[in-house]
Image (cartoon, helix red, strand yellow):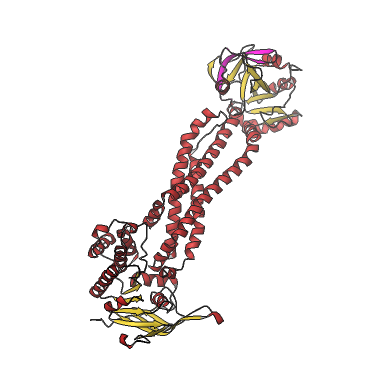
């Protein structure tokens, strides 16, 4: 039976190539989109998750790290230090901004998420320093390696905003949010660079606790005790940050995924249906010879499964081959290929193959073997 | 000419009506037809006389409107599709006018696939049996050829090999010489006759080719859905 399916398929190589190509394209698209989603998901929440805080403190109404509209009074930090369960309080000043490299056209700017932190405390600073200083000094900035790679900014360069400049003193990793990257300065540098008024205003406070398990209960207690401030667990804050970016992209991704599925299904379905119609006399012969309908259905399903398997192998192979290099061409194309997703795509391909065989199978059921005696 | 006497195909009072009401057309009328093992019967008649209807009813492909059909003593008249398919698979070999080989399969594969489905075939592996029968039919050199690479005569020989390979009791041939020239037609009919006799098969050949008559033990004439033992207008056929 597999012989009939295989021979029928390979007898028409052009049609097979179109059919397999359609499924492969669909698998490739689905695989790449899923990997892109995973890549962004991992990247966007990464900094918040990797910062070793037990609680993030923000002003009421703040949703995430990137839309950092939070504004907290400096006095709050002082109060929090006296909470018995709190071990360390680290203030952060966070602002999105555009900079340009000294010597470049001032219009040639790039986005950074500017983070002022206390280098003595260290909490809220770079996740991992790749080169240069590990703590910024006055007038220094530590940029992310992705910023360095994309905009060719290196240690020793100066970055400018308006009339103010900062000296690039180090390159760190772990602060890439795909469309922007974190850049670190000291709190004092941040205040001066941003002309912050009042100078004691802070965006976030990071807290570490003596017993991290106290975090949920303490968050609730402190919210009551300090009206206007909200206390968020790092996982929740990372998820909020993710949904800020991915929440808008996800529906588009789903639509494209569905379209990719429909393209694969249509190409495979149409080619298998055409092949079935073309071979309907031969199916009639097999029926006349005593082959049962279930046998013939299996021939079609096998054709569909062979097409699907070949398409999957090519499509998944292309995904694995192309995805790692995609970011070199398009920096925002951050992909993360997981074997679970590849397995999921295999499942989607299987569904595609089974559905594609459905209409041809119905066609076979309607073939009357008596027709083979006519002409 | 020896016949086994065992009735292989038995049609009794078979009528087949297509359509209904004022559009009803009777293709076969009250037909009685019996073929025994080792017997070759030619069913002759003009186009539209009901030959194909007779063949497809005899081949368990079509149910009669009235009457009964028995194959190898089994009444198949009211059998379900699955059982009819089993009867065709085990008991009947078909030879078609246009050969009806599977185009993507080689001669060997065309024979083997039918053998693999048949329960009659036990003992010798299907591949060995397929190779053996093709060699018997002088097609040893064509075993791995696709139908499109073979002549029409060779294709029909493969089709006959396929029909006989599963060792059925009944062979039904529909215009087996229609697409062949005189020489190839003669060769094919001679082969069919010889193998059917050797293997003691009941053979029904439906044709309007007069050359068929010389290979048949018995000739029946079908006209307007009625079967006659002689040509309705020519007593030389008796």
| Position in image of residue A153 (x %, y %) | 57, 17
Please tell me whether residue B18 belongs to the stretch shown in magenta. no
Is residue A118 visible in the rendered structure shown here? Answer: no
Q: Nearer the viewer, residue A274 or A172?
A: A274
Q: Is residue A108 left or right of residue B32?
A: right
In the picture as drawn, the residue positioned furthest to the bottom comes out as B235
Q: Tally the numbered discs.
A: 0
Which quadrant is home to the C terminus of chain B? bottom left
Instruction: Name the main secondary structure of what is drawn in magenta.
Output: strand
Task: Give percent across and percent down for residue A304.
Answer: 46, 53
Tell me the residue at 53%/51% (across/down).
A266
Residues in magenta?
Answer: A155-175
x then y, percent, for residue A309 = 44, 47
Residue B34, above or below A333: below
Q: To which quarter of the image does residue B157 belong?
A: bottom left
Residue A309 seen anywhere in this rendered image of the structure: yes
Q: Is residue A156 magenta?
A: yes
Question: Looking at the picture, how far across and down is residue A134, in whole percent?
Answer: 56, 16
Q: Nearer the viewer, residue B208 or A161?
A: B208
Quarter of the figure with residue B121: bottom left
Q: Looking at the image, is A11 positioned above or below residue B32?
A: above
Q: Is residue A157 above or below residue A124?
A: above
Residue A314, above or below B37: above
Decide if residue A259 is on the left or right side of residue B188: right
In the rendered image, the quadrant that contains the N terminus of chain B is bottom left
């Amino acid at each position: 039976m597999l012989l009939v399916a295989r021979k029928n398929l390979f007898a028409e190589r052009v049609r097979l190539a179109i059919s397999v190509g359609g499924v492969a394209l669909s698998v490739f698209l689905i695989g790449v989109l899923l990997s892109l989603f995973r890549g962004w998901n991992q990247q966007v929440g990464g900094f918040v998750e990797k910062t070793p805080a037990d609680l993030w403190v923000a002003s009421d109404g703040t949703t995430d790290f990137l839309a950092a509209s939070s504004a907290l009074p400096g006095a709050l930090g002082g109060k929090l230090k006296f909470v018995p369960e709190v071990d360390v309080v680290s203030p952060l000043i966070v602002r999105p901004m555009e900079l340009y490299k000294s010597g470049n056209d001032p219009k040639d700017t790039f986005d950074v998420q500017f983070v002022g932190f206390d280098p003595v405390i260290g909490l809220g600073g770079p996740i991992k320093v790749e080169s240069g200083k590990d703590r910024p000094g006055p007038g220094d900035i530590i940029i992310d390696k992705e910023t360095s790679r994309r905009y060719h900014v290196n240690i020793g360069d100066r970055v400018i905003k308006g009339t103010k400049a900062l000296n690039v003193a180090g390159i760190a990793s772990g602060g890439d949010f795909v469309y922007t990257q974190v850049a670190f300065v000291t709190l004092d540098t941040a205040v001066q660079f941003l002309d912050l008024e009042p100078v004691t205003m802070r965006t976030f406070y990071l807290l570490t606790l003596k017993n991290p398990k106290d975090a949920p209960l303490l968050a609730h207690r402190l919210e009551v005790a300090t009206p206007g401030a909200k206390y968020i667990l790092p996982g929740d804050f990372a998820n909020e940050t993710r949904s800020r970016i991915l929440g808008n992209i996800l529906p588009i991704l789903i639509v494209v995924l569905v379209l990719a599925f429909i393209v694969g299904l249509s190409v495979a379905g149409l080619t298998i249906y055409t092949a079935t119609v073309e071979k309907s006399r031969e199916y009639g012969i097999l029926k006349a010879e005593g082959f049962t309908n279930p046998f013939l259905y299996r021939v079609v399903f096998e054709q569909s499964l062979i097409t699907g398997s070949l398409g999957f192998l090519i499509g998944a192979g292309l995904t694995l081959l192309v995805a790692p290099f995609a970011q070199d061409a398009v920096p925002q194309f951050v992909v993360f290929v997981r074997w679970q997703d590849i397995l999921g795509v295999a499942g989607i391909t299987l569904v595609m193959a089974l559905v594609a065989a459905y209409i041809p199978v119905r066609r076979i059921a309607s073939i009357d073997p008596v027709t083979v005696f006519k002409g | 000419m020896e016949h086994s006497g065992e009735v292989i195909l038995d049609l009794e009072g078979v009528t087949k009506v297509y359509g209904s009401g004022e559009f009803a057309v009777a293709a076969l009328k009250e037909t009685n037809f019996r073929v025994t093992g080792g017997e070759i019967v030619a069913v002759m008649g003009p186009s539209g006389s009901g030959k194909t209807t007779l063949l497809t009813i005899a081949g368990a492909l079509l149910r009669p409107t009235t009457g009964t059909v028995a194959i190898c003593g089994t009444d198949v008249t009211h059998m379900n599709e699955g059982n009819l398919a089993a009867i065709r698979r085990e008991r009947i070999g078909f030879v078609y006018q246009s050969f009806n080989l599977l185009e993507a399969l080689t001669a060997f594969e065309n024979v083997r696939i039918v053998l693999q489905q048949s329960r009659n075939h036990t003992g010798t592996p299907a591949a060995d049996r397929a190779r053996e029968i093709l060699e018997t039919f002088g097609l040893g050199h064509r075993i791995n050829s696709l139908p499109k690479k073979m002549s029409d005569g060779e294709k029909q020989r493969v089709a006959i090999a396929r029909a006989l390979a599963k060792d059925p009791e009944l062979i039904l041939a529909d215009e087996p010489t229609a697409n062949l020239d005189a020489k190839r037609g003669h060769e094919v009919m001679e082969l069919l006759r010889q193998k059917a006799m050797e293997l003691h098969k009941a053979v029904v050949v439906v044709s309007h080719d007069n050359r068929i008559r010389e290979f048949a033990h018995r000739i029946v004439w079908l006209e307007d859905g009625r079967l006659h033992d002689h040509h309705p207008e020519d007593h030389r056929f008796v």
